[in-house]
Amino acid sequence: MQSQVPTFTDDIDRHDWSALGRMRYVRDYASFLKPVIIRGAFDHWPARTKWNLTFLRDRYGDLPITIDGEPRMLGPFIDEVLSSTPERPAPYLHNHLMALWPTELQSDIAPMPECTRPNWLESRFFPSRQRLTFIEVYIGGAGARFPTLHYDGLHTHAFLMQIQGVKEYVALPPEAEPLLYTPYAGSNTSPVDVQHPDLECHPLFAQATGFRFNLNPGETLFVPAGWWHTARILSSSITISINGVNAANWGYFFQDFRRTHCSSSLKGHLKAAYVQAFGFLHLVLAGAGIL
């Protein structure tokens, strides 16, 4: 008999980075595209102890931001966040590029945690005029939600570093895609509302299984390529994210990149051939333990 509701567990693996270590992380999680929460991965950041919403409001309240196409200022927005409730949530600043913020704030979140490395998109030999790896900030109050259930474009990995507040995440494996009513083949977004699913409209979603868990301050969530995820905020929150590519997801990334960034012209074919060679060399170096 078909289950009446999707099945979620909060039993996601959690480890201290000092105990997990790079070798075990790659062996047990990155290589198998298995999500994990890592504690202590960004304890070296000044932002870990320095940043909170009051600090950002008082020191950087005049920074311009844009939310849902509307120009805003950071300070008044944070005031809304601090008074946000589940019944009347404040707007959600998400996917805001850290490159738009002052260099001193960018320095507060550097270097990136070791678990995000290597990131082949940061190589100066990667042949793209458009930057494909981004460091982004997310700020929101209780009740705010990410707008869609999705996996990250181009099948990049996502790393989410929680600085302040608590978020609840839902994560579903790639094989759940047939249950998610994606609007077209290859789409990385789903219309399913995981918080209040309409099982009359989306009955197959009742068969889905995945994780539902909280991400707490000081924790990093590794969302592997192709994993569907979304979040809602339980308490006023600051999150930093970066996306990346390495040996574990290169094949998926290359398929997407060739389809979306390489035209059918001779120049497009040459670009695809170069990227394929770039990936092959990096895979060889990774296999030899050099990357």
Image (cartoon, rainbow, N blue to C red):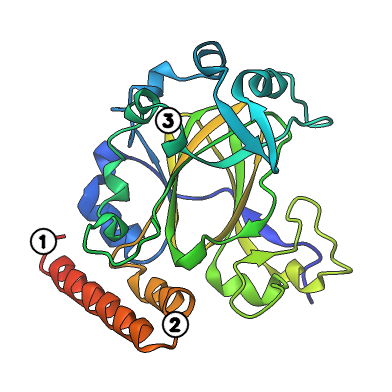
Amino acid type at mark 2: Ser
Badge 2 or badge 3: first in the primary sequence:
3
Looking at the image, is mark 2 or mark 1 nearer the viewer?
2
Location of mark 3 (residue): 218
Per the image, label 1 sits on a secondary structure element best described as loop
The crowding category of the residue bearing disc 1, from other C-alpha atoms within 10 Å (few below 14, some 14 to 19, many at least 20), is few
Looking at the image, is mark 2 or mark 3 nearer the viewer?
2
Name the one closer to the observer, 247 or 170. 247
Q: Is residue 107 above or below residue 192?
A: above
Location of mark 1 (residue): 290
Q: Is residue 50 above or below residue 288?
A: above
Amino acid type at mark 1: Ile
> Where is residue 197, by image quadrant?
bottom right
Amino acid type at mark 3: Gly
What label does residue 263 carry, if any?
2
Q: CA distance from mark 3 to mark 1?
A: 29 Å
Per the image, label 2 sits on a secondary structure element best described as loop
Q: Percent x, y for residue 255?
A: 42, 79
Residue 235 visible, this orientation = no
